[in-house]
Amino acid sequence: MFLQTTTPDTSGYMIAGYVVAFVVMGLYVASMYLRSRNLQQDLTTLEEMDKAASAQAGPAKKKSKSVTKKSVKR
Amino acid sequence: MQSKPVTLTILDVVSIILLGISTYLALVFAPTELVMGDVQRVFYFHIGTAWTALLGFILAAVFSVIYLVKKDLKWDRYQVAAIEVSLIFFFITIVLGSIWARPAWNTWWTWDPRLTTAAVTELIYIAYFMLRQGIDDPDRRARFGAVYALVGGLSAPITFFAIRLFRTIHPVVIGGANAEAEGGFSMTADMRVAFFFALFTFTIIFIDLFWNRIRLGDLQEKVEQLKLKVTM
């Protein structure tokens, strides 16, 4: 290659290099977006479950409180 | 998740614009190197990604020290973010180097000191994620990860100095020539513009991806905490 007189045509390698660089960066950005979206969905579901659990625990607590009051009165 | 900060959105846009300009400078503005031809143009992205990746690995080692001192999981998330982005950039560096080597050295790969240390560095950090996957306890995972990243951080300066310390065919474009090197070249003024702009661009892209990855880590942490709360 270095005993040549004309510049070789290596544009195919150059294109391959830039395609790889852009594809890898693009895939990484896409993976971050997908992971973020999935985590966001998980978070929403878990928050709903947490709310439902605390709503269930609320009346149960009230019930147990009133029972104790009654039992004390008796 | 908190809404995206305006600064980060601006940084996202700036990163895309800079990447576009940098690509233009590398592919159109910079002159064609006479001996190697167009393949030399991969050099701008090759060095840009290598610089930020090695810097990221060193940054991760610094975060490891801070975590080991403070025991705050925030620093563990910073460390993971730095390593993940660096791993991607370093993969691009290695692939671009290999593509350049084919016409320049007539081979895709050779076990030269620089190529070997680069491959070892990449494998060290792939193993880092495998190690983390195997540990469930967050504190233990962070402690092991910090020690590993601290020791692994040594591979970054070794890779950087490999072409300056050992006999190698990898060219030293910045900071002196190597007698055994094959494929070295002197940069013209226009090449220097494209080169330094690529360094700047990849530094900004690294900061942008690093910040986005930290936010992802924070969200992951929030989900894990809520999972524990719900299952208890």
Image (tube, rainbow, N blue to C red):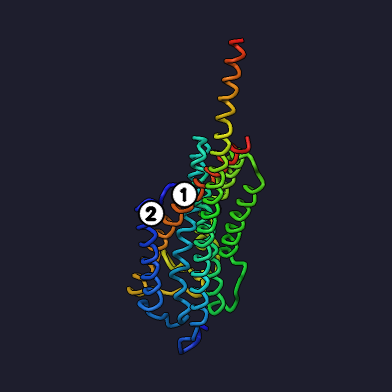
Which element is circle 1 on? helix
| Three-letter code, disc 2 | Leu
Q: Which residue is mark 1?
A: B215
Give coordinates of residue B189: x percent, y percent: 32, 73
Provide residue B63's location: percent of width, then percent of height: 49, 44
Do labels 2 and 1 touch, CB within 8 Å?
yes
Q: Is residue B165 above or below residue B152?
A: below
Q: Give the spatial CA distance, label 2 vs label 1.
A: 11 Å
B225 or B134, nearer to the observer: B225
Label 2 and label 1 in one chain: yes
Q: Residue at x 35, y 53 (%)?
A: B6
Q: Secondary structure at mark 2?
A: helix
Q: Report whether B206 appears left or right of B227.
A: left
Residue at 63%, 39% (x, y): give it.
B137
Nearest to the observer: residue B201 or residue B38: B201
Q: Residue B109: image x %, image y %?
A: 61, 71
Compared with residue B117, is residue B1 higher up or lower down, i.e. above or below?
A: above
Q: Which residue is mark 2?
A: B8
Q: What chain is tagged by disc 1?
A: B
Give the camera-side residue of B212 and A50: A50
Please give the label number shown on residue A34. none
> Which comes sooner in the sequence, label 2 or label 1?
2
Q: Residues within 10 Å of mark 2 (few under 14, many from 20)?
A: some
Report x, y in % for residue B148: 59, 46
Q: Chain of mark 2?
A: B
Foreground of the two, B141 or B55: B141
> In which quadrant is the C terminus of chain B drawn?
top right
Amino acid type assigned to the residue bearing label 1 in the image: Arg
- Residue found at x 49% / y 86%: A9
Decide if residue B93 is in sight here.
Answer: no
The residue at the point 46 percent across, 76 percent down is B40
- Say if residue B75 shows up in the picture: yes
